[in-house]
Amino acid sequence: MSYISELFGLEGKVAVVTGGSRGIGQTVSIGLAKAGAEVAILCRTQPDETLAQIEQAGGKAYHIAADVTDETAVERAFDEIFRRSGSIDIVFNNAGICIHKPTLEASVEEWRKVLDVNLNGVYHVCRAAGRIMVEHGIHGSIVNNASMSGSIVNVPQWQCSYNASKAGVLHLTRSLAVEWAQYGIRVNTISPGYTATEMSVDTPDELKNAWMPLIPMGRMGEPEELTGAVIYLASRASGYTTGANLIVDGGYVCR
Ligand code: NDP
Protein backbone atom coordinates (compact mmCIF):
# COMPACT_ATOMS: atom_id res chain seq x y z
CA MET A 1 0.00 0.00 0.00
CA SER A 2 1.38 3.46 -0.88
CA TYR A 3 2.00 6.04 1.83
CA ILE A 4 -0.81 8.22 0.39
CA SER A 5 -3.26 5.26 0.57
CA GLU A 6 -2.20 4.57 4.16
CA LEU A 7 -3.02 8.17 5.09
CA PHE A 8 -6.06 8.94 2.95
CA GLY A 9 -7.39 5.56 1.74
CA LEU A 10 -10.92 4.56 2.79
CA GLU A 11 -10.82 0.88 1.82
CA GLY A 12 -13.22 -1.20 3.94
CA LYS A 13 -15.01 1.89 5.29
CA VAL A 14 -18.75 2.53 5.03
CA ALA A 15 -19.72 6.13 4.29
CA VAL A 16 -23.16 7.76 4.39
CA VAL A 17 -23.69 10.87 2.27
CA THR A 18 -26.90 12.89 2.61
CA GLY A 19 -28.03 14.78 -0.48
CA GLY A 20 -25.93 12.69 -2.85
CA SER A 21 -28.36 12.88 -5.79
CA ARG A 22 -26.74 16.00 -7.26
CA GLY A 23 -24.34 18.87 -6.67
CA ILE A 24 -21.64 18.67 -4.00
CA GLY A 25 -23.09 15.48 -2.48
CA GLN A 26 -22.93 13.70 -5.84
CA THR A 27 -19.31 14.67 -6.50
CA VAL A 28 -18.16 13.83 -2.97
CA SER A 29 -20.01 10.47 -3.04
CA ILE A 30 -18.10 9.52 -6.19
CA GLY A 31 -14.83 10.69 -4.58
CA LEU A 32 -15.40 8.68 -1.39
CA ALA A 33 -16.18 5.59 -3.48
CA LYS A 34 -13.02 6.10 -5.57
CA ALA A 35 -11.06 6.36 -2.29
CA GLY A 36 -12.38 2.88 -1.40
CA ALA A 37 -15.49 3.43 0.74
CA GLU A 38 -18.85 1.77 0.19
CA VAL A 39 -21.27 4.70 -0.04
CA ALA A 40 -24.90 4.79 1.15
CA ILE A 41 -26.60 7.76 -0.44
CA LEU A 42 -29.42 9.15 1.69
CA CYS A 43 -31.78 11.54 -0.11
CA ARG A 44 -35.41 11.74 -1.24
CA THR A 45 -35.04 11.03 -4.96
CA GLN A 46 -33.35 8.04 -6.62
CA PRO A 47 -29.72 9.14 -7.28
CA ASP A 48 -29.41 7.25 -10.61
CA GLU A 49 -26.62 9.42 -12.03
CA THR A 50 -24.48 9.16 -8.87
CA LEU A 51 -24.94 5.38 -8.67
CA ALA A 52 -24.12 4.96 -12.37
CA GLN A 53 -20.91 7.00 -12.10
CA ILE A 54 -19.77 5.08 -9.01
CA GLU A 55 -20.47 1.76 -10.71
CA GLN A 56 -18.56 2.93 -13.79
CA ALA A 57 -15.58 3.80 -11.56
CA GLY A 58 -15.68 0.28 -10.06
CA GLY A 59 -16.99 1.48 -6.68
CA LYS A 60 -19.84 0.32 -4.44
CA ALA A 61 -22.92 2.41 -3.56
CA TYR A 62 -26.65 2.18 -2.94
CA HIS A 63 -29.58 4.50 -2.26
CA ILE A 64 -31.53 4.84 0.98
CA ALA A 65 -34.64 7.00 0.60
CA ALA A 66 -35.23 9.38 3.51
CA ASP A 67 -36.01 12.99 4.22
CA VAL A 68 -33.52 14.42 6.74
CA THR A 69 -36.28 16.47 8.42
CA ASP A 70 -38.03 13.23 9.47
CA GLU A 71 -36.12 11.95 12.51
CA THR A 72 -37.87 8.55 12.51
CA ALA A 73 -37.03 7.99 8.84
CA VAL A 74 -33.40 8.99 9.48
CA GLU A 75 -33.10 6.58 12.45
CA ARG A 76 -34.59 3.78 10.33
CA ALA A 77 -32.28 4.59 7.43
CA PHE A 78 -29.18 4.38 9.64
CA ASP A 79 -30.35 1.05 11.12
CA GLU A 80 -30.86 -0.27 7.59
CA ILE A 81 -27.41 0.91 6.45
CA PHE A 82 -25.75 -0.71 9.47
CA ARG A 83 -27.65 -3.98 8.84
CA ARG A 84 -26.74 -3.95 5.18
CA SER A 85 -23.10 -2.80 5.33
CA GLY A 86 -22.03 -3.89 8.82
CA SER A 87 -20.60 -0.51 9.89
CA ILE A 88 -20.99 3.26 9.62
CA ASP A 89 -17.52 4.84 9.68
CA ILE A 90 -17.96 8.12 7.80
CA VAL A 91 -20.87 10.53 7.44
CA PHE A 92 -20.95 13.49 5.05
CA ASN A 93 -23.93 15.46 6.31
CA ASN A 94 -24.57 17.56 3.24
CA ALA A 95 -28.30 17.88 2.37
CA GLY A 96 -29.31 21.52 2.42
CA ILE A 97 -31.51 24.21 0.87
CA CYS A 98 -31.34 28.01 0.54
CA ILE A 99 -34.03 30.68 0.16
CA HIS A 100 -33.00 34.19 -0.97
CA LYS A 101 -35.53 36.71 0.32
CA PRO A 102 -35.44 39.86 2.43
CA THR A 103 -36.44 38.94 5.96
CA LEU A 104 -39.57 41.11 5.98
CA GLU A 105 -40.80 39.46 2.76
CA ALA A 106 -40.04 35.84 3.72
CA SER A 107 -42.65 33.92 5.71
CA VAL A 108 -42.04 32.34 9.09
CA GLU A 109 -42.87 29.07 7.33
CA GLU A 110 -39.88 29.62 4.96
CA TRP A 111 -37.60 30.33 7.95
CA ARG A 112 -38.76 27.07 9.57
CA LYS A 113 -38.27 25.08 6.35
CA VAL A 114 -34.65 26.18 5.94
CA LEU A 115 -33.83 25.58 9.62
CA ASP A 116 -35.58 22.21 9.47
CA VAL A 117 -33.48 20.86 6.59
CA ASN A 118 -30.16 22.62 7.28
CA LEU A 119 -29.95 22.45 11.08
CA ASN A 120 -32.51 19.95 12.38
CA GLY A 121 -31.63 17.61 9.50
CA VAL A 122 -27.92 17.74 10.36
CA TYR A 123 -28.77 17.12 14.03
CA HIS A 124 -31.00 14.10 13.19
CA VAL A 125 -28.25 12.58 11.05
CA CYS A 126 -25.49 13.23 13.63
CA ARG A 127 -27.67 11.71 16.35
CA ALA A 128 -28.55 8.57 14.35
CA ALA A 129 -24.90 8.07 13.32
CA GLY A 130 -23.58 8.80 16.82
CA ARG A 131 -25.96 6.27 18.37
CA ILE A 132 -24.72 3.49 16.09
CA MET A 133 -21.05 4.47 16.45
CA VAL A 134 -21.27 4.55 20.26
CA GLU A 135 -23.29 1.28 20.50
CA HIS A 136 -20.79 -0.56 18.30
CA GLY A 137 -17.56 1.12 19.46
CA ILE A 138 -16.91 2.61 16.01
CA HIS A 139 -14.35 5.44 15.98
CA GLY A 140 -16.10 7.26 13.16
CA SER A 141 -15.74 10.59 11.43
CA ILE A 142 -18.69 12.93 10.83
CA VAL A 143 -18.17 15.78 8.37
CA ASN A 144 -20.93 18.37 8.37
CA ASN A 145 -21.32 20.62 5.35
CA ALA A 146 -21.77 24.15 6.70
CA SER A 147 -20.98 27.15 4.50
CA MET A 148 -18.96 30.34 4.60
CA SER A 149 -22.42 31.85 5.27
CA GLY A 150 -22.13 30.45 8.81
CA SER A 151 -19.29 32.92 9.41
CA ILE A 152 -20.09 35.93 7.16
CA VAL A 153 -23.22 37.66 5.81
CA ASN A 154 -23.50 37.29 2.04
CA VAL A 155 -24.36 40.31 -0.10
CA PRO A 156 -26.26 41.52 -2.04
CA GLN A 157 -28.84 38.72 -1.57
CA TRP A 158 -30.60 38.38 1.76
CA GLN A 159 -30.77 34.90 3.25
CA CYS A 160 -30.90 35.23 7.03
CA SER A 161 -32.46 31.79 7.56
CA TYR A 162 -29.65 30.10 5.61
CA ASN A 163 -26.90 32.07 7.37
CA ALA A 164 -28.38 31.34 10.80
CA SER A 165 -28.81 27.63 9.99
CA LYS A 166 -25.16 27.33 8.92
CA ALA A 167 -23.87 29.19 12.00
CA GLY A 168 -25.89 26.62 13.95
CA VAL A 169 -24.18 23.77 12.09
CA LEU A 170 -20.75 25.18 13.03
CA HIS A 171 -21.51 25.27 16.75
CA LEU A 172 -23.47 22.00 16.74
CA THR A 173 -20.31 20.46 15.25
CA ARG A 174 -17.99 21.93 17.91
CA SER A 175 -20.42 20.83 20.65
CA LEU A 176 -20.59 17.24 19.40
CA ALA A 177 -16.81 17.16 18.81
CA VAL A 178 -16.21 17.86 22.50
CA GLU A 179 -19.05 15.62 23.74
CA TRP A 180 -18.15 12.62 21.57
CA ALA A 181 -14.33 12.79 21.78
CA GLN A 182 -14.62 10.32 24.68
CA TYR A 183 -16.03 7.74 22.21
CA GLY A 184 -13.34 8.32 19.58
CA ILE A 185 -15.85 9.98 17.23
CA ARG A 186 -14.54 13.03 15.37
CA VAL A 187 -16.92 15.75 14.16
CA ASN A 188 -15.75 18.51 11.79
CA THR A 189 -17.20 20.91 9.22
CA ILE A 190 -16.27 22.08 5.79
CA SER A 191 -17.38 25.60 4.84
CA PRO A 192 -17.63 25.99 1.08
CA GLY A 193 -17.86 29.36 -0.60
CA TYR A 194 -19.86 29.83 -3.81
CA THR A 195 -19.70 26.46 -5.56
CA ALA A 196 -21.00 25.72 -9.06
CA THR A 197 -24.04 23.48 -8.47
CA GLU A 198 -27.77 23.78 -9.22
CA MET A 199 -28.13 25.71 -5.95
CA SER A 200 -25.88 28.51 -7.21
CA VAL A 201 -25.69 28.09 -11.01
CA ASP A 202 -29.43 28.84 -11.44
CA THR A 203 -28.80 32.15 -9.68
CA PRO A 204 -29.39 35.19 -11.94
CA ASP A 205 -26.27 36.54 -13.68
CA GLU A 206 -26.59 39.97 -12.07
CA LEU A 207 -26.21 38.34 -8.65
CA LYS A 208 -23.24 36.21 -9.73
CA ASN A 209 -21.59 39.29 -11.27
CA ALA A 210 -21.95 41.04 -7.93
CA TRP A 211 -20.25 38.11 -6.15
CA MET A 212 -17.12 37.88 -8.32
CA PRO A 213 -15.27 41.02 -7.11
CA LEU A 214 -15.81 39.83 -3.52
CA ILE A 215 -14.02 36.50 -4.14
CA PRO A 216 -10.22 36.96 -3.98
CA MET A 217 -9.74 34.06 -6.43
CA GLY A 218 -12.27 35.69 -8.80
CA ARG A 219 -14.33 32.56 -9.57
CA MET A 220 -16.75 30.08 -8.09
CA GLY A 221 -15.41 26.79 -6.75
CA GLU A 222 -16.06 23.44 -8.41
CA PRO A 223 -17.60 20.58 -6.37
CA GLU A 224 -14.42 18.53 -7.09
CA GLU A 225 -12.49 21.12 -5.08
CA LEU A 226 -14.35 19.96 -1.94
CA THR A 227 -13.76 16.23 -2.38
CA GLY A 228 -10.20 16.30 -1.01
CA ALA A 229 -11.28 18.29 2.04
CA VAL A 230 -13.94 15.67 2.90
CA ILE A 231 -11.58 12.74 2.26
CA TYR A 232 -8.96 14.39 4.51
CA LEU A 233 -11.46 14.83 7.37
CA ALA A 234 -12.87 11.32 6.83
CA SER A 235 -9.48 9.57 6.78
CA ARG A 236 -6.79 8.70 9.30
CA ALA A 237 -4.77 11.65 7.95
CA SER A 238 -6.87 13.91 10.22
CA GLY A 239 -6.86 11.55 13.23
CA TYR A 240 -6.18 14.34 15.76
CA THR A 241 -8.57 16.88 14.18
CA THR A 242 -11.99 17.38 15.71
CA GLY A 243 -14.28 20.42 16.04
CA ALA A 244 -12.42 22.07 13.14
CA ASN A 245 -13.90 24.08 10.28
CA LEU A 246 -12.13 23.69 6.94
CA ILE A 247 -12.97 26.74 4.81
CA VAL A 248 -12.90 26.20 1.02
CA ASP A 249 -14.03 29.55 -0.38
CA GLY A 250 -11.34 31.04 -2.67
CA GLY A 251 -10.40 33.41 0.16
CA TYR A 252 -13.86 35.04 0.59
CA VAL A 253 -13.98 35.14 4.40
CA CYS A 254 -10.48 36.68 4.67
CA ARG A 255 -11.67 40.06 3.35
P1 NDP B 1 -28.09 20.98 -4.46
O1 NDP B 1 -29.37 21.75 -4.41
O2 NDP B 1 -27.37 20.80 -5.74
O3 NDP B 1 -28.31 19.53 -3.79
C1 NDP B 1 -28.97 19.42 -2.56
C2 NDP B 1 -29.04 17.96 -2.16
O4 NDP B 1 -29.71 17.89 -0.88
C3 NDP B 1 -29.83 17.11 -3.13
O5 NDP B 1 -29.14 15.90 -3.33
C4 NDP B 1 -31.15 16.87 -2.42
O6 NDP B 1 -31.61 15.57 -2.76
C5 NDP B 1 -30.75 16.93 -0.95
N1 NDP B 1 -31.85 17.32 -0.07
C6 NDP B 1 -32.48 18.53 -0.03
N2 NDP B 1 -33.45 18.50 0.90
C7 NDP B 1 -33.41 17.27 1.47
C8 NDP B 1 -34.15 16.63 2.49
N3 NDP B 1 -35.14 17.26 3.13
N4 NDP B 1 -33.84 15.36 2.83
C9 NDP B 1 -32.84 14.69 2.18
N5 NDP B 1 -32.10 15.25 1.21
C10 NDP B 1 -32.39 16.52 0.85
O7 NDP B 1 -27.15 21.68 -3.36
P2 NDP B 1 -25.55 21.85 -3.29
O8 NDP B 1 -24.89 20.63 -3.74
O9 NDP B 1 -25.19 23.16 -3.88
O10 NDP B 1 -25.39 22.01 -1.71
C11 NDP B 1 -25.10 20.91 -0.87
C12 NDP B 1 -24.74 21.47 0.51
O11 NDP B 1 -23.65 22.38 0.37
C13 NDP B 1 -25.86 22.25 1.19
O12 NDP B 1 -25.87 21.97 2.56
C14 NDP B 1 -25.45 23.69 0.95
O13 NDP B 1 -25.97 24.56 1.93
C15 NDP B 1 -23.95 23.59 1.03
N6 NDP B 1 -23.26 24.69 0.37
C16 NDP B 1 -23.45 24.93 -0.97
C17 NDP B 1 -22.83 26.01 -1.57
C18 NDP B 1 -23.00 26.31 -3.02
O14 NDP B 1 -22.58 27.41 -3.45
N7 NDP B 1 -23.55 25.43 -3.83
C19 NDP B 1 -21.96 26.91 -0.80
C20 NDP B 1 -21.83 26.56 0.59
C21 NDP B 1 -22.46 25.48 1.14
P3 NDP B 1 -33.15 15.16 -2.97
O15 NDP B 1 -33.85 16.32 -3.61
O16 NDP B 1 -33.06 13.94 -3.80
O17 NDP B 1 -33.65 14.85 -1.60
Image: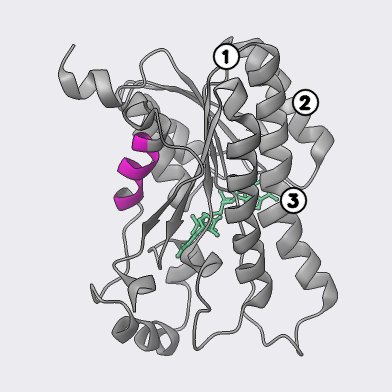
Q: Is residue 75 left or right of residue 13?
A: right
The C terminus lies in quadrant: bottom left
**Residue 31 or 59: which is nearer the viewer?**
31
Q: Which residues are magenta?
A: 225-232
Which amino acid does the dot numbered 1 rest on?
Ser
What residue is at 37 percent from the left and 27 percent from the top?
A: 235
Residue with the mark numbered 2: 76
Quadrant of the rendered image containing residue 19: top right
**Residue 235 or 92: which is nearer the viewer?**
235
- Residue 234 place in picture, x, y as percent: 42, 31
What residue is at 49 percent from the left and 49 percent from the top?
A: 22
Residue with the mark numbered 1: 87
Which amino acid does the dot numbered 2 rest on?
Arg
Chief secondary structure of the magenta portion: helix
Give the structural element (helix, strand or loop) at label 3. Answer: helix
Other-residue count near label 3 (Cα within 10 Å), few / some / many at <14 / 14–19 / ≥20: many
Q: CA distance from mark 3 to mark 2?
A: 16 Å
In the image, the residue with mark 2 has its CB under 8 Å from the nearest atom of ligand 1:
no
Whether 130 is drawn above or below 121: the answer is above
The numbered mark, 3 or 2, whose residue comes first in the sequence reads 2
Residue with the mark numbered 3: 120
